[in-house]
Image: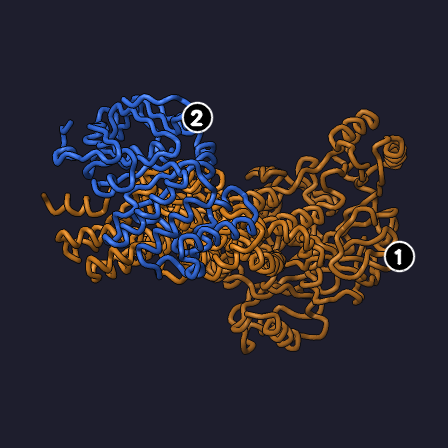
Chain colours: A blue, B orange
Amino acid sequence: MDVMSGMDALIQISDVTKRYDAGGVAAVNQITLQVARGEAMAVMGPSGSGKSTLLNLIAGLDRPTSGTVTVAGERIDRLSETRLARFRRSRIGMIFQFFNLIDDLTVLDNVMLPAQLIGAPRGRALARARELLSALMIEQHEKAYPARLSGGERQRVAIARALVNRPELLLADEPTGALDTRTGQQIGALLQELNRAGQTMVLVTHSPELAARYASRTAAIVDGQIEGRRLAGEPLAAGDLHAGAR
Amino acid sequence: MSARRVLRAAAGRGPGRRVQAVVIFLVLLASTAAATVGLALVAVDSNGAFQRSFTAQHGADVAAGVDPARATSAQLAATGRLPGVTAIAGPFALTSIGLDASGSPLGTVTVAGRTSPGGPVDDLTLTAGRWPSRPGQIVIADDLGQGPDDQTTLQIGSTVTVTTAPGKPKLTVVGMARSITDTAGAWVVPAEIAALRTPGAPALEQMLYRFTLAGSAAQIRADVAAVTAALPAGAIAGTAPWLTAPNTANGSSSIVAPFVMAFAIMGLVLSVLIVANVVSGAVVAGYRRIGVLKSIGLTPAQVTIAYVRRVGVPAVAGCVLGVAAGNLLALPVLSNSASVYGVGSQSVPPWVDIATPLGMCALAGLAALLPALRASRLSAVQAIATGQAPRQGRGYGAHRLLGRMPLPRAMTIGLAAPFARPARTMVTLAAIVFGATAVIFAVGLDASLARAATGTEHAEGPGQVVVYPGGSSSEFTAGQERKAVAVIRALPGTADYVAEATPTVGVSGLTRQVNAEAFLGNAAWTDYDMVTGHWYGGAGQADVNTVFLTQTGLSVGDTTSVISGGKMMTVRIVGEVFDPDNQPLLIAGWQTLGGAAAGLAIQQYDIGLKPGVSPDAYSNSLNQALGAGFGSGTYGGGLFFGIAKSLISMLTLIVAVVAGLGVLNTVLLGARERRHDLGVFKALGMTPRQAIGMVVCWVAAPAIAAAIIAAPAADILHSATVRAMANAAGTAIPASYTHVLAVPALAALALSGLVIASCGALLPGTWAARSTAAAALRAE
């Protein structure tokens, strides 16, 4: 179990279990985890291991069956849906494997959306969105629709959208999972750059290489339980990703 | 796995399917009920029923009053051989008598002397008892002598007194009968007539005619002209055509028919639209599932069957219950006309009960079959792709435009959404238009009926009190008059009062006596609504109702001869009042109708109350002050208007519910299609309230467009329907009866579409807001 002072931990997960059916198999089973500010943590595991479920619990997209989830000092497992939504849009940025951009909106409108949901004036949201698109080198696509973009471009748009409200925490669920290797590496490098600039992030991935390259710490999750933790630089054993490996 | 289980699995289960099944069931239930009511009213056409009765009873196309001094029986019989005359009956001796039953006056009644009820023309229906066999016996019309609330006060064996005949003879009621064209109010043996005639009243006979052509006023005038020309000059004293009879016979059924038809048609069209949309939408929503099932081996036929069955079960259940509901709803309207014609009870025709559910099921089946067939023909990949969100490119412009508006972002996203599915949006628009039109139409109709009710009741309406002599006398004594006036003036709640006599008078051109109201004093406050012209202002002026003008062929401005109390006088018609009674009415001042010299005597005092004064409390105070020898009463609202208002409310509710269900279905389909997007919005931080607002905004734009369409449409429909109702009642109406909704009120009512749309969207919006983002994001 990680021990971290309360002041350092941005995320504190204590004995969290998530079951989708009463009496059914736990997707996440008594997990305890902490993530420090400025840390880039990778949660790695095979399909069905519970890593995406864990990410959803951290984001407040789902509620634990038991246990507590504290993000930035807020017990998000106790928040109402409205307060969760408000918390999420101002403090958390989400990046998804399949981008989850809104097809009816232009690139610029997609990026501006979280800012507008907060109620930011259109001008301010516009300026911030353009700043991010420029930083991510896709400003030329601001009037395009997501269907016209490549996978890598869409993921850059998604990253820009996730950053528009300057979140304390960035959560990325398989950010390179739908991308080719080269594009994946580019996106990975982007995330690494963000982390170097101080962005706290949790990455969910099934790729040990991605975890090793872009995360300072990795937690392996198998069958809903943390099976092992590695710091950056420590090699991963071949059997670490298999069920029951310790 | 058996084929049946495969098909069941193909159709799918789960809460979403159950909701859809419930929606399909409710839509079919409401739509079938509305369609049943509508078709029943079309089928049981009032005039059709009257026409059947008229033919069966050999109704008289024309009833002619004849002066026996100017035409012999042979000459009258010869008119039966004129070209165009198909049958005659008569001459029947005729006279007008005053009848009284145990102290209760029954008014003036036209009595004819006939040896039997049957005949080649005007074959009477004997509804009780037997025909008179000797003098001293009388058969009365079965609607004569019915007291308030349709309680019959005369029965077989009752004794009536002829108050206008010498010696006031008594007659025994031996039977009750009905004439389809109301040629007389009572019948006696021919030999009795002379003894019943008022001293000094001229002898009169009645001839009844049926013609080859008698379908219009012009044809009847030509027929009458031919008969008149064939007889010596002055032989024909007056005629009454059958054309006015349907209006008098139809009563409330024909009056309500126009607005019920309007609602029924709206309900029918809306039902067809919504059923097609709901059912086809249910199948289209399953396209992706169909594609997956095809990819694992389901045949096209199995796919088609599975999805037709899926909508078939709730649709059939809804249709069956809808027919039952429609029958229940149609009963109040149809029951009114059943007794009028003596043709037995009237109900929804069997063919309507069969055709309506079959038709609605066929419609639902077709709406399911077409998209199911289409899906079965698509490849698995195409079916999956077609079942996804709307084709890209639609609605982009709307999003761009609305995104720039200074409105909350969730709202602008919602407002732009309908443009992505234009066909479905048009159906939603149509549903809301119909719903809003129904609401505006109902409010306008209610207001018009309220004005008509007030116009009908005028001096006898709520807020008015009438004082009349107690006991058996229908006229005040001089002492009673003095006392009544003193008490009325002294009561603090009195605003106005006027003395009134209600004689019957003869009018040139009419065979029957006409009800008259003679006012002694200022009666302008009685507030008759004027259709045209003005309230009578001086001697020699009179106001009449529409039926009077129709039956005499006169117009406002014409003069006519009136016989009151045996004295003839000329009156000028200066106004047409709104009085939808099916009998002609003449209103004039005391002296215009001859005053006391013509035998007029005060029979009641009409009292108008000050605002806020309770009629019941005033009446109690009045009775206490007057003491014995007087009676007073207050008047409640008309039963017809109460029934009409209930009917309007019921029909509006049906249409609004169907419209709301249509909107609900559209929003459900949209929420299902956009479930993933909703998950993304929530993941990005959209609060539940914002999500609900966004979903409601999906229908807000169509609702506002619907308001713009519905307001003028409802206004036109309202005016046309009120006029049709007036035509059915045989009366004209003042312009104020159609101009009931001011523009601001109309605009506010038009937003009822927004209310309907919001109600339909609120439930799916709440569901969307409640679902977790993670679950929504897992939806593809």
Label 1 Cα neighbours within 10 Å, binned few <14 / some 14-19 / many ≥20? few
Amino acid type, label 1: Gly
| Dots 2 and 1 on the same chain | no
Q: Visible in this render: residue B125?
A: no
- Which residue does the image show at 23% across and 47% down from the upper left? B11
Residue at 18% x, 51% y is B293
Observer-side mark, 2 or 1, equals 2
Spot occupied by residue B662 in the image (x, y as percentages of width and height): 42, 50
Name the residue that disc number 2 marks.
A73
Which residue of the protein is positioned furthest toward the front in this rendering? A233
Task: Name the residue nearer the viewer: B359 or B748.
Answer: B748
Q: Chain of mark 1?
A: B
Q: How many callouts does the rendering have?
A: 2
The residue indicated by pointer 1 is: B538
For the residues labelled 2 and 1, say whether their Cβ atoms are less than 8 Å apart.
Answer: no
- Does A40 sit left or right of B128 as displayed? left
Which of the two residues, B619 or B437, is positioned nearer the viewer here? B437
Q: Look at the image and tell me in which quarter the N terminus of chain B lies.
A: top left
Taking A246 as reference, is B770 left or right?
Answer: right
Image x and y of residue B644, in percent: 57, 46
Measuring from the top left, give residue B600's x and y in whole percent: 83, 47
Q: Depth check: give the residue in front, B653 or A163.
A: A163
| Helix, strand or loop at mark 1 | loop
